[in-house]
Amino acid sequence: MKGKTNDLSEHLAATVRHLVKARRKQVVLFIDNADQRDDIVQQEAFLVAQELADRWPVTVFLTLRPETFHASTKRGALSGYHPKAFTIEPPRIDEALRARIRFAKKLTRGDLELAKVERIGIQLESLHTLLEVVEKSLEGGRELISCIECISRGNVRMAIQILSDFFGNAHVDTNRMLSIARESGTYVVPLWELLAAIIYGDTEYYDPERSPVANLFDVHRNDPKEHFLLPVLLAFLRQPGPFGADNGFVESGPIYERVQSLGFTPDQIDHALLKSMKSGLVETVGRRIGDGDVARSTAFRVTSRGDYQVSRLCGMFTYLDAVIVDTPIFDETARQALRSGGLAVAMVDRVRRVDLFSKYLTGIWETAGLQGSDFSWQDRSRELEEELAKIRSRLAQRTMKY
């Protein structure tokens, strides 16, 4: 008997056969979270699942990313088999967030017992008010939901983490929120306040290594035009056209051909694609053989995060105000003007700096010869000018009031 149990694989197989035949049970095996791993691991997991289904009297379910499944059925481990595929839609982000807030409100109301609350000194009344503020803001603010959905790339866990990090974030003035909510009966969280919490996280200044939001205007080489390489690349990937592979993926050939025609080198494009993958701006079909190699990535698709950044975020004051500190400035006059006075704190100084930064980028854009690309800095800068005008107006009204 001991010899049989020592052979774990055969022992488990015999156990399953006993359950099926002697006890008349149906055995279903789930291999979960494989979709959180890279393509190689997902395909290896499939081969394991296939082997189990062949040798054991079990039904095996395996989670794979859609892009991995479709690519592997053509060129990978799945190409020699005919598995049945079921698409499971993720829960809606807004519904998941509201459900989590409703549960948190039960705790703050005392509907559910919290034995440790008194010892850690949480002010449940204030926390309950903040939860109601955020709940009402999400109900009436499609922009907030869209922002969370895009930055999280539809990942419910990350979306909940974004909302959780918003509470108590150093860049969110919760005292002001509470004061306004109690005096007027309501407070609507503006998009810029949520974005500030997402972009900075728990850091005082923007850190590209820790922020889920990438700096689209960063450069790899000593080339001012490269400020717009990532925006141009992402804008091309998000356009519908004849280049798409399956499910919106674009083959690498047309990408390099298009971006090279705008004056960028293959090395620059390699670096831009690699940064985009690391930052979650694009996803890929194929295998990467190293952090510095994209040669085996056969097709690319812009993610919701990349789409949101290039079409919305890069023309917003909060975003540009953050990434200024991480963007090399090639023009000496502009660099001195932007660096004078150190890191701006007062809003009027921050508005001035963002305006200067925008004008610097506009000067680069006008001489870069990128007007024929799918990205339009003119549109983003126009949106920024409108936002800056509103901020200046509010600042002027505040000055007159005091």
Image: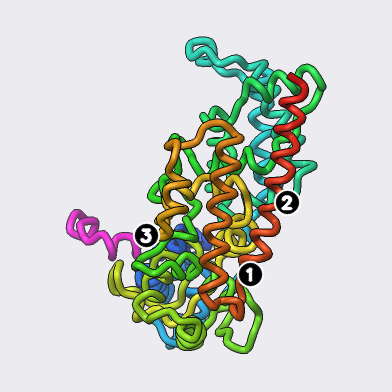
Report whether 180 appears left or right of 90.
right
Span highlighted in magenta in the image: 1-15
Crowding around mark 1 (Cα neighbors within 10 Å: few <14, some 14 to 19, many 20+) is some
Q: Residue at x 54, y 64 (%)?
A: 363
Vertical side of 367 occupied by 329: above or below? above
Q: Residue at x 50, y 36 (%)?
A: 344
Vertical side of 32 occupied by 401: above or below? above
Residue with the mark numbered 3: 15
Q: Secondary structure at mark 1?
A: loop
The answer to which of 48 and 300 lies nearer the viewer is 300
Q: Residue at x 47, y 74 (%)?
A: 68
Identify the disc placed on residue 376. Answer: 1
Vertical side of 88 occupied by 323: above or below? above
Q: Position of residue 111 (x, y in %)?
A: 69, 20
Picture quadrant where residue 189 is located: top right
**Which quarter shows the C terminus?**
top right
Q: Position of residue 32 (x, y in %)?
A: 46, 58
- Distance of label 2 from label 3 (alpha carbons): 69 Å
Our reading of the magenta stretch's main secondary structure is: helix
Earlier in the chain: of badge 2 and badge 1, it is 1
Picture quadrant where residue 180 is located: top right
Disc 3 marks a residue whose amino acid type is Thr
Residue with the mark numbered 2: 386
Q: Secondary structure at mark 3?
A: helix
Q: Residue at x 59, y 44 (%)?
A: 195
